[in-house]
Amino acid sequence: QVQLVESGGGFVQAGGSLRLSCAASGRTFGSFNMGWFRQAPGKEREFVTRINWSLGTYYADSVKGRFTISRDNDRNTVFLQMNSLKPEDTAVYYCAGGPNIAGSNWRLYDYWGQGTQVTVSS
């Protein structure tokens, strides 16, 4: 019912910035909770940030103050602005969403994008 497509990943040096986008299909997007997760090789998928239907936001401690999540419901799009990037931010970043989600565990999310690679060099 819902398809998510991420874009905007790339290669940057430490201290640089990237802006990720997640385009969603479906007319129920506005009622969805949306989140960003990331997964590095050999590591488990981890929560990065999320935004709920009322625009409340939540961040992992590791990115708080550096990353900002936002959404444009008219365009069915969620964004992730990443500043002051560090090598440890290197991972595949996934957009996820679903209705009635009130948590940061990836298992709570019903719909997922294919992921976009973010690589940060030292």
Image: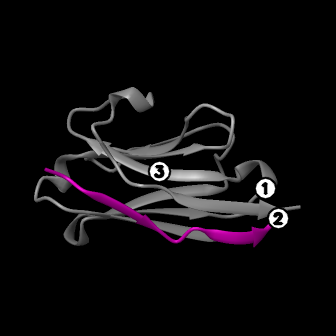
| Spot occupied by residue 105 in the image (x, y as percentages of width and height) | 44, 27
* Cβ atoms at labels 2 and 1 below 8 Å apart: yes
**Label 3 or label 2, whichever comes before in sequence order:** 2
Look at discs 3 and 2 and give the one toward the viewer: 3
Label 3: state its secondary structure. strand
Residues shaded magenta: 1-15
Q: Is residue 25 left or right of residue 66?
A: left
| Residue 94: mark | 3
Q: Is residue 36 left or right of residue 42?
A: left
* Cβ atoms at labels 1 and 3 below 8 Å apart: no
In the depicted view, which residue is nearer to us: 114 or 26? 114
The structure residue drawn at horizontal position 89% and vertical position 61%, both measured from the top left corner, is 122
| Spot occupied by residue 34 in the image (x, y as percentages of width and height) | 34, 47
Q: Label 1 crowding class (10 Å Cα cut-off): few <14, some 14-19, many 20+?
A: many
Report the Cα–Cα distance between label 3 and label 2.
Answer: 21 Å
The structure residue drawn at horizontal position 43% and vertical position 44%, both measured from the top left corner, is 50
- In this figure, which residue is indicated by the disc labeled 2? 14
Label 1: state its secondary structure. loop
Please tell me whether residue 121 is drawn above or below residue 113 in the rendered image: below
Label 2: state its secondary structure. loop
Report the Cα–Cα distance between label 2 and label 1.
Answer: 5 Å
Q: Is residue 105 left or right of residue 45?
A: left
**Label 1 or label 3, whichever comes before in sequence order:** 1
- In this figure, which residue is indicated by the disc labeled 1? 86
> Please, what is the three-letter code of the amino acid marked with disc 2?
Ala
> Please, what is the three-letter code of the amino acid marked with disc 1?
Lys
Q: Is residue 16 visible?
A: no
Please tell me whether residue 121 is drawn above or below residue 48 in the rendered image: below
The structure residue drawn at horizontal position 52% and vertical position 71%, both measured from the top left corner, is 8
Please tell me whether residue 78 is drawn above or below residue 31 in the rendered image: below
**Label 2 or label 1, whichever comes before in sequence order:** 2
> Please, what is the three-letter code of the amino acid marked with disc 3?
Tyr
